[in-house]
Amino acid sequence: MSSLKYMSRANLYFWLINLLLCYYSTQIKAQVFEKTPELHGDIVVFPITIINAFPFISGTVNGVEGKFMFDTGSPATISLNDNFIKLPNKKVKGNGLVASGQSFKTSISDTIREIKFANGITYRNLENIISGNYDFLQKHITPDCIGYVGHNFFNGYLFKLDYLQRKITFYKTSAERNISKDFLLNEKVLAIIDFEIRKLPNNPLVKLKIGHIDVLGAFDTGQYGSLQLDSISGYKLKSKGYVINSGTDSSGDTLLNVKNITIGKFKTDLKGVGFSNLEDTQIVRNALGITEPNILDIGYRFFSQYKTVWDYPNKKIYILEY
């Protein structure tokens, strides 16, 4: 009899624990916010999918499923692809242009009924949401692209980008976190890089060297990684074997292996970086205020090798070991 009574109490105990866990899980998943797409909470995790070197966050817009590109090169909070999502009440705003050269029509919608992410975070009755015809993303990357998540979405947060575990973790900035640096718990820090901001607050720029040649590096999740050199620098680096043609990609574009890259005291090599000429970089140069002759766009090829923490308020990027 005492054994049955003990089992009954034990079952009741575990039942109550499960009930509490379910309750708190529901509370975490059922985060619903109104009007403005911005982060809430101390630590927020978004699962990501890597498609053709680009990070995407799954979600729905007004019930339509798709994927948002997580693009630090975009200043927007959320920008919708109105070639995929039907927005009958949108108002034409003007024209837009991305760094790769594609132009598109931009519009604005007074109200978006609902945007819901795979982690359960939901925004309703969103006001004044920008959209554009991003058919080029559908054609070249993924047909279910529903837009961008950009820099202003995570204002007031730093984030850890982890392509191996397929997640982005956002940490709310605070004086306490600046001291504790809990975002580095159980991490091996390889380097801490100071960056500068010029024209746009969302684009970290760093000074680096390839061999003894000065190059400006631009961190951006929304691109693959590319190198543009003036003719003299290109000749010197190729003659020393620091820049080597490694073939072509599926589009027939030249790929490069780049050796002896130094950022501060941190040294690395990159394989399969795209080749760019001066004309290819004019949009980026004008937008970011770049006058230096040589540019290394730091994208997927770097982030697939290293975990990174982007601390915008303190203008630092932490390079971590996978």
Image (spheres, rainbow, N blue to C red):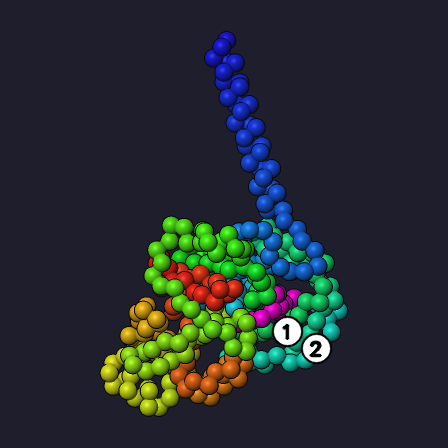
Residue found at x 60% / y 42%: 26
Classify mark 2: helix, strand or loop. strand
Task: Read off the residue under disc 2.
Answer: 93
Q: Which residues are magenta?
A: 73-86
Marks 1 and 2: CB-CB under 8 Å? Answer: no
Q: Which residue is at 48% across, 56% downward? A: 178
Q: Amino acid at mark 2?
A: Lys
| Residue displayed at 38% across by 50% down | 186
| Inter-mark Cα distance, 1 to 2 | 9 Å
Residue 214 in percent (x, y) is at: 35, 81
Residue 160: in magenta span:
no
Q: Residues within 10 Å of mark 1 (few under 14, many from 20)?
A: many
Depth check: give the residue in front, 136 or 101: 101
Q: From this view, report whether residue 288 is shown above or below residue 66.
A: below
Q: Secondary structure at mark 1?
A: strand
Q: Amino acid at mark 1?
A: Gly
- Residue at which label 1 appears: 132
Q: Identify the main secondary structure in magenta.
A: loop
Q: In the displayed structure, does residue 293 sit left or right of residue 8?
A: left
> Which sits in the foreground, 209 or 230?
209
